[in-house]
Amino acid sequence: MTLLEEIGVQSKLLNPSGGCHNCPMKLVDFVPATLPTARILVLGEAPGATEVEKGYGWAGRAGEKLRTHFAAVGITEFAYSNVLHCRPPNNATPKPKAVACCLSQFVLDEIRGYPIVVLAGNVPLTALFPGAKSNRFRGNVAHHPDFPGQVFYHIYHPAYMLRRPDLEPRFRQHIERLARIAAGEPPLPWKVLQGGGAEMWAALDKALAAPLISLDVETPTLRSWDPHAQMKSVALTADAKTVIAASEEDSWFVAFLDRIKDYLRKPEKAVVSNNIGFDLDWHEYELDFDVRCTGVYDIGVIWYHAGQYKMPSLKELSANELDGYRYLVYQPHKNTDANLNTLYNGEDVVQALLLFYKGIKLLKPRTRDLCLRVLGPSSLVLRHIQTTGIYLRQEYRAAQIEEHKARRKASIIAWQAADPAFIPTVHESGNGLKEYLFTIHRLESMGTTDKGEPSTDKSTIKKWIRDGAGFLTHLLDVREVDKLLSTYLEAYDKLVEPNNRIHSQYPMTWTDTGRSSSRKPNMQNIARVPAIRDLFGVPPGSVMIEADLSQMEFRIMVCLAKDPTGIQGYINGDDAHTITARNFAPTPTKEQRTRAKPINFALLYGGGWENVQRQARNEYDLDWSQTMCEGFTTIFFDTYQRLPQYHTECQVAFIQNRGWFESILGHIYHYRDWDNPNRGRQEHAFRSYLNSHAQGPCAQIMFAIMVHARRLLNDRNLQRVRFINTVHDSVLIEAPDPKLVPEVVHIMEQARAIVFEWVKPWFVVPLEVEYSVGESWGSLEEYKL
């Protein structure tokens, strides 16, 4: 369905008095469009106070800025209008109903006939391209199926530049591109070959003889695991001059794909794309094979480091780092213009290859090695985790939902019995809870939230309980049950597939530390409650294996700090918790070792006795006094004497490098709040900076192990052994037969040994992986090597 069909308009004449009775604006503060003959029409959001006063659009400060930038590049004549022709009350964001009304009555007619329509800001973009994302369209030439012969060009709204002067250079760059578009751009420097003729096949053979190709796939869905989904088209290039393309309508499409399949099976070959794991995974699913080429390069990963882009799209990178798209197609899987789709696909592979060569030159050798050796191939491994999915034990989940609801009911009854003043539902949350705590029981405020409200978080409630308000233990229990129900037990109804699997996403370019993230749902933040982790398991007859890097962050930190106690302890076969616990007893018991954990976790990245006390109380239910925590802090830093010095050295480097960070493996990130006037934000930036020294390398070492293990599993024809989740320093594996456990563990150990050779110039302690096995995540048992 096209935009016009959605709105219910096929052809509408301008009629300012008709139809506005459906709009809440009611022609209040109406400002008409200004429509002279010109090549460009600028479409904004809505008139402001100055526009209403003067009676024409773009009359205020934003209009002045736009005209100044236009004049600087020689654009002197243009028409202008707004998505809304009436000023919204208090300059509020336009409502969908008002937008739809104004589109049908005015805008769709006003923009017709103008060769170039400039969409200033997000409101006009999403009005004409519903669901479009600004970072994909901004700075690129887009085509709309309802307006053939016209092009659409999205820019920042000039008013936004008044608030974000730091983006002025980018805004100027996009305006300069607009001037070139208006003047007429030169012919394309590349051509597309398709149709199955001799020239196309010869060009394909030549491209596939090259060591590196840029590859792109168009699909009807993101879900390659959908049994009914198939690739719609494929394009590739090896030189950014000749693009070879084919689509599912071509009779020779399968033969075309088979040639690519043969290429991707060769270990010496390389392939590049943005989100490369997606493209390769689709080939694997459709053609039923395993990618064996070792050169797997991801544009997003490269430009995350080269340009500090988070979750970049190919379109955003092209607009900012090259000269943008000429043929950006809105919803290409719905577009019926085959020629336009071909040009769009061709542009994808050309831009990706150019961005690869430009980006790789900007990286330092160590960062380049990290991106090419580990992070690019990891994008395919993480995509495999998504497409395989993790098995959800549905019968167990149903039982847990009933059990937790019963537990909540029992907690409410016990709360009433402990405190007759408590009224269920009324006093459980919100304003009712505040009244219950601070008015009825007159509890002392222990601090405030960011909004200035009295704090009622877990640590505050525990303080009140220690001070005698024991009935609040029931509040904590109710909150815990509610969180488990809403976050895990009941939330998965919308996420689980018919095959009882959940397919989480694992973006690689979102966190500042260099770890991957997880979303929809977040499988890296599952509560460490066995009953909740047992929701996730393997199908009957299969087995789950967890490979967990042993105390990896602590090992990395003592290596980076060159701490002799920590290094020698690990070389001797000890661990950090045992070393710390020896300050309590020469031969620590299991309980004493456990008591060392809050000390180590709280102080590894700096901090003081307050951190120890908070960690002990909130995570281990240990009620340690200030004096005890001060003593533990002194003991810790006396034991690991190089750590506090290293923390200080990092703080000095943080300031000297103006927030720029480079990890021991080459991960690059800029902490822009390094000099923020807000002390809290500055301290948070440094804490993240310090954490990144170990957290990033820890995750990237696990990435490398997974990459090598996947290759070794393929070599052993163990493709049915699949990774199903990763949590920074660990990976969950599903094997179809428990008898495979020894072989899988052996392969993981081989991969660990390969990766250790990579890091051992600086990682001077043993690299150890601990294994556990079982049928569900929360009930895994240790597996001895």
Image: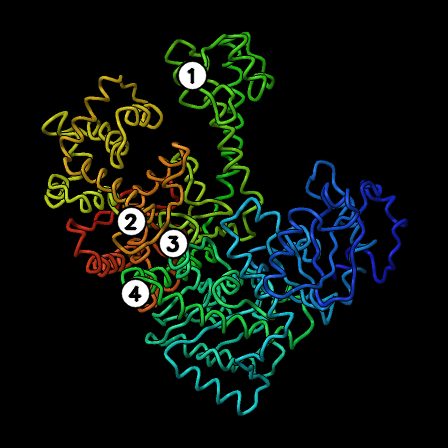
The three-letter amino acid code for the residue at tag 4 is: Leu
**N-terminal-most mark, 1 or 4:** 1
Q: In which quarter of the image is residue 677?
A: top left
Say the numbered circle drawn on residue 734: 3
Residue holding disc 1: 446
User: How was the colour assigned to the protein in this rendering?
Assistant: rainbow
**N-terminal-most mark, 3 or 2:** 2
**N-terminal-most mark, 2 or 1:** 1
Query: Judging from the image, what secondary structure is the residue with disc 2 in?
Result: helix
Residue at 71% across, 62% down: 78
Query: In the rendered view, would you say 381 is above or below 494?
Result: below
Pair 3/2: label in front: 2
Query: In the rendered view, would you say 769 is above or below 474?
Result: below
Q: Counting other residues with Cα less than 10 Å from the Cα at mark 1, is it few (<14), some (14-19), or many (20 or more)?
A: some
Pair 4/2: label in front: 2
Pair 1/4: label in front: 1
Q: Where is residue 317 in the image (x, y as percent from the top left)?
A: 49, 62
**N-terminal-most mark, 4 or 2:** 2
Q: Counting other residues with Cα less than 10 Å from the Cα at mark 4, is it few (<14), some (14-19), or many (20 or more)?
A: some
Q: Do the residues labelled 4 and 2 touch (CB within 8 Å)?
A: no
